[in-house]
Amino acid sequence: MTATSNAVTVLKATEESPSLGRGATPRAQLDFKLRVAGLNFYYGAKQALYDIGLQILVHRITALIGPSGCGKTTFLRTLNRMYETVPRARAEGAVLLDDEDVLAMDVVSLRRRVGMVFQKSNPFPKSIFDNVAYGLKVNGTRRKGALAEAVERSLRRAALWDEVKGQLHKSAYALSGGQQQRLCIARALAVDPEVLLLDEPCSALDPIATAKIEELLFDLKETCTIIIVTHNMQQAARVANDTGFFLLGRLIEFNRTEMIFKTPARRETEDYITGRFG
Amino acid sequence: MGARETWRKFVNVFMFSLTGLCAFTAVGFLFFILGYLLWNGGRALNWAFLTHLPTPVGEAGGGMANAIVGSAKLLLLASLVGIPPGFLGGVYLGEFGGKTFSFLVRYTTDLLNGVPSIVVGIFAYTIVVLPLRHFSTLAGGLALGVMMIPIAVRSTEESLRTVPQTLREGALALGASKWKTVATVVVPAAGRGIVTGFVLDLARVAGETAPLLFTAFSNRFWSPGWNQPTASLPVMVFTYAISPYEDWHRQAWAAGLVLLLLVLVTNIAARLLVSGRMSVPQV
């Protein structure tokens, strides 16, 4: 606990940033939504992340790439503490959302601010309406009018409204795979998260559905800070402003996407994006 | 064709036939019992059987209206006693339990499930019949209810385990607490399986006779309230089947059939109740 608190204090005090070095906008003009320093992560005795440090800019899309098992999903799940569902998993280090310590704050309020969309769409066995309204209902919104309004707004933001508006009472399972994933995005958006985490949201979708979701991310950027884990490097290159490359539990390189893909600073990054391994 | 290949094909056909034959035998027995019951019970079943009290020995006709109502009351009471702790205990095991205590609870419920029903009857006899000094619906319902608990616990737990982890994560990621997640997503998603488990559980105790013999006992008349001995269908089947009267034998078959129909109606009603609910498609 003391190690974590110290790291948080240091991070808050110095505002030292190990990331976004070359070619990035000077620190003073930037607004960081998430700041991570000295993050180590363990599943029991097995260490999964080593000394991760990066800062994520507000209203931008950040992609995390790397081969399977490199820790990018674990890192993503640290940001909303979803790793806590795994017994004996623990994170040490500093993770700040604005100026709040993610690892110490109330987990329910954290997850209301940091939403998540999963690899496999996971709509609840409820109607389309009840799926989108779920987050609001558990947060205490009961008024029918407010719920209906939020459901419509969220479905519009997820570009799903026109396809489902006449059938909100139908089961969410009646939708296609791509629609289900957009429903899950709408569900996450309904509680107005500040950060949206996406864990390979398109890996089970066809190219058309994928294109729709990518388009959607551009619009969502206006209101959310987006972090997306992807195996698809073209996707990272298409949608992300910044990209981080993970390998064997370490953050090898983190920079603006065009720098990562055109002039990577590290040999490992170049090998990975050119397909020499991974 | 080599000898090995011939042998392999023979074994294949032989094993296929053997499993098929055994499967056929298994359902065969069930259909035989069901058909026999329908044939014998159906002939003795009439409106008077459902609406009249038993007649005195030697007088033809009469029915088992009191036993039908008695069985229904006993099963209602058993559900009230057995399902709440069984359900919540199963939720605990499936969603909240730690390792050691869960192991203990699971082991104990399995043990309780193996306790002979007549022993459960003695238990109800000791804690209800002896202090009150008379047999009652209450004692019988308690005995059957206690018998329901272990299966209710395990079937609830098993149903919850079929709910994909991704659904729990989806709810937690939206800021739902663990309890909210369980109550609003996991339990509804497993609802159909949970209810089916309860119905099977109820069907199992509906036919129990031994624990009723010295708890609910029997009654040739109506049993108002919950505090008097009551007739029940299984005990009536037992009493009438071992009697020397041909007419009673026929009525025992009818009672068996009515018991079966009672379970069937409960089953269908419970399924209708949950059929409108949306469930997770199996992948």
Image: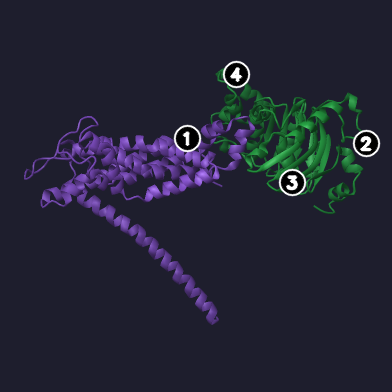
Disc number at residue A146? Answer: 4
Identify the residue under disc 2: A22
Q: Earlier in the sequence, mark 3 or mark 4?
A: 3
Is residue B199 visible from the viewing direction of this image? yes
Q: CA distance from mark 1 to mark 3?
A: 41 Å
Q: Which mark is residue A48?
A: 3
Report the residue at 62% width, 25% height from top.
Answer: A151
Q: Are marks 3 and 4 on the same chain?
A: yes
Indicate the position of residue B154 as horizontal and vertical percent values.
44, 45
Instruction: For marks 1 and 3, give the one nearer the viewer.
Output: 3
Label 2 is found on which chain of the structure?
A: A
Relative to A100, say whether A41 is above or below: below
Specify the amino acid type for callout 3.
Answer: Ala
> In terms of secondary structure, where does tag 1 sit?
loop
Q: Chain of mark 3?
A: A
Q: Which chain is purple?
A: B
Q: Quadrant of the N terminus of chain A?
A: top right
The answer to whether B60 appears left or right of B237 in the picture is left
Image spot of residue A123 (x, y percent): 59, 36
Classify residue A114 by image quadrant: top right
